[in-house]
Image (spheres, rainbow, N blue to C red):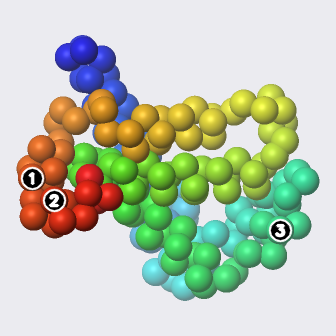
Amino acid sequence: MKKIDKLFSLLRLALGFVFFWAFIDKVWGLGFATTPDKSWLQGVSPTTGFLKFGAEGIFAPFFHGLAGNPLIDWLFMLGLLGIGVSLLLGIGLRIAGYSGVLLISFLYLSLFPSENNPLVDEHIIYLLLFLIFARGEVGHRFSLYRWWGQSDLVKKYPILQ
């Protein structure tokens, strides 16, 4: 079990970095997925480009209607940050895992059906990883998981585990 826990810990860190990096790039426009002139700090919606021009498939009209909504922007960005930091630190994995499932489900539906496979794509793989981390049974190495679990806050509100 030690070797598999190390592997899941590395997966947790990698997935956390994917989400944290997406947040950082969208805020500052580091020139990877987001150019500086299209950063959130420049007043550009971090979701409009994808929701308006990237969403396709049977649910696309619903997602097009969300484009440019400041509430959606804030929820998306807080989701990226919260999920990313939680996975990187190994704390709040239950909430991060279920939040990740929700976020990835919306992304999956915004592209449904996928052009390469009508049912399973990378979103489903992410979703399954989030469910594994939400269960709290693996991926605790290289983290603050034990310290976090022993805190008074988590003892009072176990959902924060």
- At 88% from the left edge and 51% from the top edge, which residue is drawn? 57
Q: Position of residue 140 (x, y in %)?
A: 22, 35
Secondary structure type for disc 2: helix
- At 43% from the left edge and 48% from the top edge, which residue is drawn? 97
Q: Earlier in the sequence, mark 2 or mark 1?
A: 1
Q: Residue 90 carries which label?
A: none
Find disc 2 in the rendering and name its residue.
Answer: 155
Image quarter of residue 122: top right
Q: Give the CA separation, mark 2 to mark 1.
A: 7 Å
Q: Do the residues labelled 1 and 3 touch (CB within 8 Å)?
A: no
Q: Give the CA separation, mark 1 to mark 3.
A: 43 Å
Q: Which amino acid does label 1 sit on?
A: Gln
Q: Nearer the viewer, mark 3 or mark 2?
A: 2
Q: Position of residue 107 (x, y in %)?
A: 67, 53
Say whether residue 119 is left or right of residue 30: right
Secondary structure type for disc 3: helix
Q: Do the residues labelled 3 and 2 touch (CB within 8 Å)?
A: no
Q: Which of marks 3 and 2 is nearer the N terminus?
A: 3
Find disc 3 in the rendering and name its residue.
Answer: 62
Say whether residue 33 is left or right of residue 28: right
- At 38% from the left edge and 39% from the top edge, which residue is drawn? 135
Secondary structure type for disc 1: loop
Q: Determine whether 55 is above or below 129 in the image.
A: below
Q: What residue type is labelled 3?
A: Phe
Q: Nearer the viewer, mark 2 or mark 1?
A: 2
Residue 29 in view of the camera: no
- At 20% from the left edge and 17% from the top edge, which residue is drawn? 2
Q: Which amino acid does label 2 sit on?
A: Lys
Residue 104 in view of the camera: yes
